[in-house]
Image (spheres, rainbow, N blue to C red):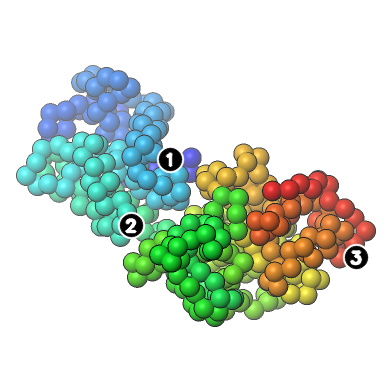
Amino acid sequence: MRGLLQAAELVRQTTPLLSEARLNECGVAEVGYRLSVLGRRGVVLGDRMDRAQADASLWSELLTCDALARGSLAGWDLLGPSRQAAVLSFLLGPGCNDPQALATGRGSRRRQLRSIWRYPDDVAALLPQFERDSLGRVSPELAIRRQREAALWNSETPMTQILKAKQDTFLKKAPIASNYLSTTGKVKVAAKALIRCSSIEEVAGDAHDLVTLEDQAGQWYLYGPHFGPETPAAPAKGRITTVDWSDLNAPVGRYFTVSEVLRGDLRRRPAAGSPEEKNILGVIRDADLIREHWGGPVLITSGYRPEPFNRAVGGVSDSRHVAGDALDIFPGDGDLNGMFAWLKGRWSGALGDGRRKGFLHIDKRNGGGFHPKGGVSPCAVWDY
């Protein structure tokens, strides 16, 4: 939804509103925000539109573009809103990249996108090329819009994350125990070795992550509890009330960073001042207390998961991760059994037993939280 809203705003800011239909350079009638089709019929001279009607028609056409992208561009739901907005505005048109050709339609723009979709830098380079009108002439209006689309796309450029292996482990071609994989399906990683990742994605209902390695080394699975940040963040001082969600290294709590809460994915950023941000800060304050009283590192396998990311990793529709007040955690020393027994007497929210999958779930439903002195019990307990 945020991508659609951003796309609509981009089009409104860069495209003059035509209140009465007029012919474009190819003799095709356009109205509103340069739309040549209204519903299932073409625009004809004499069609008129006020701003409210133009906005409604624009929204309808953007929904059509969204359905087109969803059905043809892999991983569409996993794009952030800015990248979705850039593509939706681009698909909506107009614009072509051939000085010799007449009008280029939506289908042609989609085909060119699909041909380079696996390479984000190429997508950013492609958008500004479609700055010509339907006669192949450079259009100042389209040039501005295309540059804005490219800027939106680049605003979500992934950031490199460096992980350190805490023990001898493996990178794997499947999220299963390494002894089930052949020698070609796994690569040994020595303790303290560093790996550079351009993206990290959670695996549904597990403590594995799918990482994209830099230097064209491809995608591999790793077992989250076996890895940690290259340099653990120093404890932050004071109570955290504001967070720079665009900085993966910014503190969210005394012991936790944006990277850990968002699982390294800036597309998950909550809106500043939103209820979700408030919930995140609340559950992280509890996690800080757990870390202090446990007496050792506590790591996050899953934090804030807005849709569609929650759905992509198998989360239920009413997951507390969507609201921001839930975490999946594991102790740095690996003692999940000990931590589970310890938390059962100190956590009054919900407690999910995911020990066999490598994590424990905590959330603050019913006003629950951490009680250092104990004497409480979870309001709900279940197994994964």
**Circles 1 and 2: CB atoms closer than 8 Å:** no
Residue topped by disc 1: 4
The residues bearing labels 1 and 2 have C-alpha atoms spaced at a distance of 20 Å
Is 365 in front, or is 203? Answer: 203
Considering every residue shown, the one lying at the far right of the view is: 375
As shown in the figure, which amino acid type bears the numbered disc 3?
A: Lys
Tell which circle, 1 or 3, labels the residue nearer the N-terminal end. 1
The residue at the point 45 percent across, 41 percent down is 5
Please provide percent x and percent y for residue 195.
Answer: 47, 73
**Circles 2 and 3: CB atoms closer than 8 Å:** no
Label 3 Cα neighbours within 10 Å, binned few <14 / some 14-19 / many ≥20: few
Q: Which mark is residue 120?
A: 2
Considering every residue shown, the one lying at the far left of the view is: 100
As shown in the figure, which amino acid type bears the numbered disc 2?
A: Pro
- Residue 90's place in the image compared with 296, above or below, is above
The residue at the point 33 percent across, 39 percent down is 72
Please provide percent x and percent y for residue 96.
Answer: 18, 44
Q: Which mark is residue 304?
A: none
Label 1 Cα neighbours within 10 Å, binned few <14 / some 14-19 / many ≥20: many
Secondary structure beneath label 3:
loop
Tell which circle, 2 or 3, labels the residue nearer the N-terminal end. 2
Total of numbered circles in the picture? Answer: 3
Is 381 in front, or is 318? Answer: 381
Secondary structure beneath label 1:
helix
- Residue 100's place in the image compared with 37, above or below, is below
Please provide percent x and percent y for residue 355.
Answer: 71, 57
